[in-house]
Image (tube, helix red, strand yellow):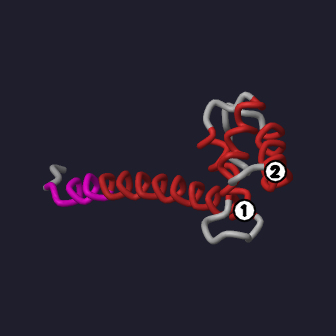
Amino acid sequence: MARSSSYPAELRERAVRMVAEHRDDYGSEFEAIKSIASKLGIGSAETLRKWVRQSEIDAGQRPGVSSEENTEIKRLKRENAELRRANEILKAASAFFAAELDRPHRF
């Protein structure tokens, strides 16, 4: 879980571990999630549920995009946007200088 969050990484990891350890103590996984979220002061059970699902994806227990892959995708999207901006600047400069070459020069 490499994302930044308003919750410390240690709390996230502990909460996910507690759900895994105490899942069988409750009638359903979501009951365990609700209980553990309230005990640890996590604002929403849905938040903890998402952490649990992402942990399962990262561990290869569930299909989906892992945290590492998601980080790489975000990095590549930023790089792609930067390259597009650079390309637009180069196109504009190229058009400007091409227009300069087409103008008649007075000597």
Which of pointers 1 and 2 indicates the residue nearer the eye?
2
Residue at 61% from the left image edge and 65% from the top image edge: 65
Compute the Cα span from label 1 to label 2.
19 Å
Q: Amino acid at mark 2?
A: Asp
Q: Which mark is residue 56?
A: 1
Considering the numbered disc 2 on the image, is that residue within a helix, a strand or a loop? helix
Residue underneath mark 2? 25
Q: Are circles 1 and 2 on residues that touch, CB within 8 Å?
A: no
Q: Nearer the viewer, residue 16 or 8?
A: 16
Q: Residue at x 59, y 43 (%)?
A: 46
Where does the image place residue 43, in percent across and percent down from the top left?
63, 30
Q: Local crowd at mark 1 within 10 Å, few (<14), some, or many (≥20)?
A: some
x and y percentages locating residue 81 in the rendered image: 46, 54
Looking at the rendering, the stretch of residues picked out in magenta corresponds to: 94-103
Vertical relation: 7 (above or below) 64: above
Residue under the image location 78 percent in, 40 percent down:
9
Q: Is residue 59 magenta?
A: no
Q: Amino acid at mark 1?
A: Glu
Q: Quadrant of residue 72?
A: bottom right
Q: Is the magenta region chiefly helix, strand or loop?
A: helix
